[in-house]
């Protein structure tokens, strides 16, 4: 799990999240935003990429407001900021504004090290978000996820889950959440085995796999079975999002061996091979359509619609059609 400095106030003027593990970086941001909105429900959140943070933008965002509103300004990939923008950020660090929390996400390493050093010198609250490349780290992460949910899982169950899912922390976290929601009592190796071998048809990941493969009927059948066996709709939208994102990431990557792509994209090699097979028929427009469908379904299952099951069915059908877009083109 992400390691934090001793000063762990999420409303500190500056939070610095360092590393390349996307799940941990996102959680660092979510923690700050949640704390800010707990203090002020009307908190304004600005989530920016380097191309959106031009010279002068930070000064504009952090200028005093007549209404003294609380604000969270998130800067992703801070190592890629231009030299002029880095100057703006360093100047701001010397005199941070009240009621504003700046969150810098930095990959670490030599690139942009001057900004990293300046943030640390300014007393930033720092969260380490390193890539978990060692099996032991992923195993510790899995155990921590179960503990965070107040659930007990045997060491063998945690190991079996890591072996089944691989190195994708989002999938590991989603699998832990699914097991915790579905299973009462201690989660053991037999439970993991049922979910990821004998009962794979009830898994949200199977719904996603069939959808991104364009197998509409099978995806809908897996969806209905998953819902019937008690899988939470939000876990299914999460799996759909992961499946579509994997297609998009791999389709945008340069060719290479699975091992090389695995390091570049943060996927296990076995998943690279599987996604390569699934991405046949996909186009960039199809990925965009599918992502919008997932976002709409996510809103629908979280209270934005009257029928979560219909929202999921609609998303599955849209994704499966998008998977065949090249063939129809």
Image (spheres, rainbow, N blue to C red):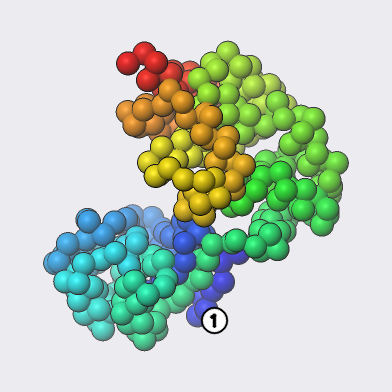
Question: Which quarter shows the N terminus?
Answer: bottom right
Occupied quadrant, residue 291:
top left
Question: Which quarter shows the C terminus?
Answer: top left
Q: Is residue 170 above or below residue 16?
A: above
Would residue 311 be seen by someone viewing this image from the given angle?
no
Would residue 202 be seen by someone viewing this image from the given angle?
yes
User: Residue lying furthest bottom in this view?
Assistant: 121
Q: Is residue 51 left or right of residue 20?
A: left
Question: What residue is shown at x 41% (from left), y 73% (from top)?
Answer: 109
Q: Pinpoint residue 211: horizontal percent, then vertical percent.
A: 53, 24
Q: Is residue 92 above or below residue 246?
A: below
Q: Is residue 143 left or right of residue 114?
A: right
Tell how many labels. Answer: 1
Question: What residue is shown at x 79% (from left), y 30% (from top)?
Answer: 198
Q: Pinpoint residue 130: horizontal percent, then vertical percent.
A: 53, 66
User: Residue lying furthest left in this view?
Assistant: 56
Residue position marked by numbered label 1 in the rendering: 6
Occupied quadrant, residue 295:
top left
Depth order, front residue of 172/123: 172
Category of crowding for the residue at label 1, using alpha-carbon neighbours closer than 10 angstroms: few (below 14), some (14–19), many (at least 20): few
Q: Is residue 18 left or right of residue 112?
A: right
Question: What residue is shown at x 50% (from left), y 59% (from top)?
Answer: 21
SS class of the residue under badge 1? Answer: loop
Question: What residue is shown at x 71% (from left), y 44% (from top)?
Answer: 164
Q: Pinpoint residue 31: horizontal percent, then vertical percent.
A: 48, 61
């Amino acid at each position: 799990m992400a390691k934090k400095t001793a000063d762990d106030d999420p409303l500190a003027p500056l939070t610095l999240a360092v590393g390349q593990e996307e799940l941990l970086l996102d959680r660092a941001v979510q923690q700050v935003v949640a704390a800010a909105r707990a203090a002020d429900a009307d908190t304004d959140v600005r989530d920016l990429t380097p191309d959106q943070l031009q010279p002068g933008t930070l000064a504009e965002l952090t200028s005093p407001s007549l209404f003294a509103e609380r604000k969270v300004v998130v800067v992703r990939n801070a190592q890629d900021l231009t030299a002029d923008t880095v100057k703006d950020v360093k100047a701001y660090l010397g005199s941070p504004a009240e009621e504003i929390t700046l969150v810098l996400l930095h990959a670490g390493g030599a690139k942009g090290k001057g900004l990293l050093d300046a943030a640390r010198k300014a007393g930033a609250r720092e969260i380490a978000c390193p890539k978990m490349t060692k099996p032991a780290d992923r195993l510790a992460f899995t155990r921590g996820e179960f503990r965070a949910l107040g659930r007990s899982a045997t060491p063998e169950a945690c190991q079996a889950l890591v072996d089944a899912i691989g190195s994708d922390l989002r999938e590991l976290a989603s699998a832990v959440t699914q097991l915790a929601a579905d299973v009462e009592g201690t989660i053991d190796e037999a439970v993991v085995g049922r979910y990821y071998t004998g009962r794979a048809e009830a898994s949200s990941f199977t719904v996603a796999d069939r959808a991104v493969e364009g197998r509409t009927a099978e995806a809908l059948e897996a969806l209905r079975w998953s819902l019937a066996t008690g899988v939470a709709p939000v876990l299914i939208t999460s799996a759909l999002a992961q499946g579509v994102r994997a297609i998009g990431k791999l389709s945008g990557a340069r060719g290479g061996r699975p091992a090389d792509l695995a390091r570049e994209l943060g996927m296990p090699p076995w998943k690279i091979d599987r996604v390569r097979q699934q991405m046949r028929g996909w186009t960039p427009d199809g990925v965009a359509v599918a992502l919008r469908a997932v976002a709409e379904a996510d809103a629908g299952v979280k209270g934005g619609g009257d029928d979560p099951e219909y929202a999921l069915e609609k998303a599955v059908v849209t994704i499966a059609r998008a998977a065949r877009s090249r063939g129809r083109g």
